[in-house]
Image (cartoon, rainbow, N blue to C red):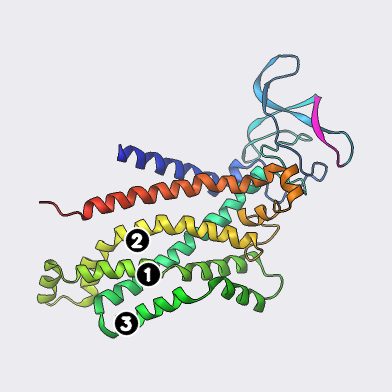
Amino acid sequence: MKHMKLRLTLAALAVLHALVVFAAFFAPYDYAEQHRDYPFAPPAHVRWRDAAGRFHARPFVYGIAQDSPGGDYGEDRGRFYPIDFFVRGRLFGVPAPGVLFLWGSDGLGRDVFSRVLYGGQVSLLTGLVAAFLSLALGLVCGTLAGFHGGWVDRLLMRGAELFLALPWLYLLLAVRAFLPLHISTAQAFFLLVAIIGTVGWVRPARMVRGVVLSARERGFVLAARGFGASSGYLIRRHILPLTWSVILTQATVLIPRYILAEVTLSFLGLGVGEPVPSWGNMLAEARQYHTLISHPWMLAPGLALIPLLLGYLILADILLERTGSESKPTY
């Protein structure tokens, strides 16, 4: 049962990651493509039967009609556009002048569904790279502290306590204040990764340190040391393999945490800005009450977060159970 749950979780995460990574194929439009005639258009109704009740071999959407500029939208039953598959290097789309807004459009007439997929690239990549940075720092510091002990251990662990005490949000605000008002997308991305990634290395470092402290006293390590093995050999050959389960479990915990951190910071205007989408700056467009009430589909980035975060949390729970069961003594 647990193996089936693990396989289903991994399969769901693989599908979600594939949708984001290959957004250029799955999204019907580019993230910056605008349809200025259709601001805040509602989600399209994909149909198989027309108004006369005739069944169509391919799904289609009706044209968009508007009572007046800025008025309510409706369907133009006199025009319909079949959905074509594998066109212009994308999975699906409709012929011009038709438009296909599966999750509606934003204030500039940009397709929300396409922007959610493209925006997931920024949020997901930030979480992955920041988690890798935290785990790398935690692995190095925890291994050095646990293996050498003494003043090395005290120095690294006191430094870890200092990192825990620093107000990282205010530090990020201070760093951002010293930068130019408009920075490039790449600069904003690396700033986010550097700040977020250096915040969370303390917990993995402490857990790795505990594993290393236990491992260095094991019989096979003491025997290898007695035969003259160097410290580098002991760490590489005997001790680091024992830390992989901790690193893997921590990765499944840190990645969703850092994705959520990127979304929060971008929502506050401290991350990647327009026109490049991220789930955070897309949600910032929906923070006004009248926008949220009139155009609820602007919350789509927040809804897209739920299955991704839930998948990682379930995976972390499964790995924690397996690690706990493997660590129990057998008699």
Extreme residue in the right direction? 68
Answer yes or no: is residue 285 visible: yes
Residue at x 24% of width, y 50% of height: 325
Q: Is residue 72 magenta?
A: yes
Quadrant hosting residue 113: top right
Per the image, the residue denoted by label 2 is 247
Position of residue 68 measured from the top left corner of the image (x, y, whole percent): 89, 37
Per the image, the residue denoted by label 1 is 138
Extreme residue in the top direction? 53
Foreground mark, 3 or 1, reads 3
Disc 3 residue type (three-letter): Arg
Per the image, the residue denoted by label 3 is 154
Seen from the viewer's position, the closer of residues 255 and 310 is: 310
Say if mark 1 contacts mark 2, CB within 8 Å. yes
271 with respect to 202 (left or right): right
- Mark 1 lies on a secondary structure that is helix
For marks 2 and 3, give the CA distance. Answer: 22 Å
Dot 2 surroundings within 10 Å: few (below 14), some, or many (20 or more)? many
Q: Quadrant of the N terminus?
A: top left
Disc 1 residue type (three-letter): Gly
Disc 2 residue type (three-letter): Ile
Seen from the viewer's position, the closer of residues 293 and 8 is: 293
Residue span colored magenta: 70-77
Residue at x 61% of width, y 48% of height: 301
Residue at x 69% of width, y 42% of height: 296
